[in-house]
Image: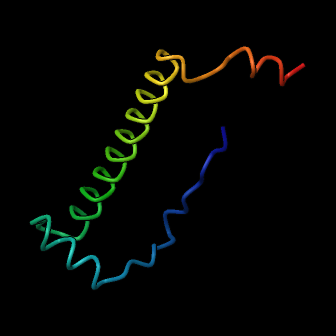
Amino acid sequence: MTETVIKRDAEPEINQELLEEAQRQIGASSGNDAINVALRELVEDRRGRRARALENLQRIADEGGVDFDAIEDADR
């Protein structure tokens, strides 16, 4: 796994208009709170999407929608 290093002295460039809008929509008391809520929501949304995609793939496989023999034949 690749390790990401964040320099603590480097300030991220944040669009202030977007930050203020997010802060209003979320009802956050600070920009930092708004950023953390937005990041949490993004991560939870993406996790949910991946879980639903995996469930759909499993359902398709369970219903015979994936021809595993054809996949094995293609690998030969």
Estimate the x, y position of residue 55 in percent, counting from the top left: 41, 26
10 horizontally vs 76: left or right: left
What residue lies at 49% left-to-right and 63% top-to-bottom?
A: 8
In the image, residue 12 sits, relative to residue 67, either above or below, namely: below
In the image, residue 72 sits, relative to residue 53, either above or below, namely: above
Determine which quarter of the picture holds residue 26: bottom left
What residue lies at 85% left-to-right and 22% top-to-bottom?
A: 75
Estimate the x, y position of residue 54 in percent, counting from the top left: 46, 29
The one nearer the camera, 1 or 30, is 1
In the image, residue 51 sits, relative to residue 14, either above or below, namely: above
The one nearer the camera, 28 or 63, is 63
User: Which residue of the protein is positioned furthest toward the right in this rendering?
Assistant: 76
Estimate the x, y position of residue 7 in percent, counting from the top left: 55, 63
The one nearer the camera, 8 or 62, is 62
What residue lies at 21% left-to-right and 79% top-to-bottom?
A: 20
Quarter of the figure that contains the C terminus: top right
In this picture the colour scheme is: rainbow
What residue lies at 66% left-to-right and 43% top-to-bottom?
A: 2
Estimate the x, y position of residue 11 in percent, counting from the top left: 45, 74
Quarter of the figure that contains the N terminus: top right
